[in-house]
Image (tube, rainbow, N blue to C red):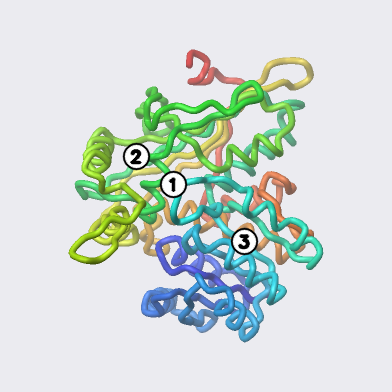
Amino acid sequence: MARVMIVGAGGVGSVVAHKCAAQAEFSEILLASRTVAKCEAIAAHIGSSKVKTAALDADIASNTVKLLKDFQPDILINVALPYQDLALMDACLEAGVDYLDTANYEPPDVAKFEYSWQWAYQDRFKEAGLTAILGCGFDPGVTGVFTAYALKHYFDEIHTLDIIDCNAGSHGKAFATNFNPEINIREITQRGRYYENGEWKEIDPLSVHYPIPYPEIGEKESYLLYHEELESLVKNIPGLKRARFWMTFSEAYINHLRVLEAVGMTRIDEVEYQGQKIVPLQFLKAVLPEPSSLAEDYTGQTSIGCWIEGIKDGKVRKYYVYNNCDHAACYQEVGSQGISYTTGVPAVIGALMVIKGLWKKPGVFNVEEFDPDPFMELLGPLGLPWHEVIDQPSPFDQI
């Protein structure tokens, strides 16, 4: 029996709390956020005596240290903002608690997505005998586990990896983001980047796109983006010659985004308005729909997977592994939409891997560095069944 502390009470935090409460391995759960009323609403929806709540400003490490020492959890699951990753890692080191997150650190003043800041904690976590798991959502997260699973069971060498992410759902809003608007828009408006033949190549934002078919959904226009798991997979998967990430967007979404960029609403630097300093993107976040509010009326599916090509026994092999997730089914189960669900469930599985000792070793790690099998075994039972397509034509054969 273990105790878990969850930091963050947005859509993903709600899923993590619901799923942790349903696991016999967790005896007590503390859900903490700057807005304690959000924690209390989630706890009331779960209706379990295992779930406690607390107010926490996670920007200040000493606040988290105090809460960690009072509650004494076995692991902290960080589903707060990526800006808070380092402060939470510092707190875990001081309090002696294992750490897990779903998105890599980024500084508030520049849209820069890389693991260097967190990988720099390797020696400190190793010397403390603590485990830190980075990027254990779906992408990053399950996509890394999928890749490690493919390498273990189907390939001698992986040469190309294309991660494809489709949200074919409808929430009925003119424009909304499926997770934190500030993080989502920063991610999409940065320059695209992919790995090929030993170097990183950059493209203009959303400038490369193709129609890609998705199971049970059909063809959707898919845009080449940079996504953080590419960095760790290139580092940790030997022999990788090309790695790319693709995501779908509707024409309406792209049009809205381009207008917002054109009028300066996606800027992350401060501007002066009526004698006050404001960040336009933060103001935009305040007026856009809260992602968790989209859940009730969301219909349709997500589809996220990996198309992988490489060599097995001297022959070329192609492999596709994916999950489809239904928005309405997620809402019926835990009151969330599918984007929050596909991020939250893997975080719970990762925490279970650590407390069971299966992924427990001192240091800082990405998910593809561990044995993928026990994680894959829990994906279906916890709500994310996966499927395989082996040695069939790839949509990337002509791209």
Decide: marks 2, 1 in contact (CB < 8 A)? no
Is residue 199 rendered to the left or right of residue 384?
A: right
Decide: marks 1, 3 in contact (CB < 8 A)? no
Residue marked by disc 2: 168
Amino acid type indicated by mark 3? Leu
Q: Secondary structure at mark 2?
A: loop
Q: Quadrant of residue 187?
A: top left
Q: Residue furthest top?
A: 398
Residue at x 68% of width, y 27% of height? 240
Label 1 vs 3, first from the N-terminus: 3
Q: Quadrant of residue 62?
A: bottom right
Amino acid type indicated by mark 1? Cys
Work out which quarter of the rendered image holds the N terminus and state it. bottom right
- Of 348 and 328, nearer the camera is 348
Is residue 4 rendered to the left or right of residue 257?
A: right
Residue at x 69% of width, y 39% of height? 148
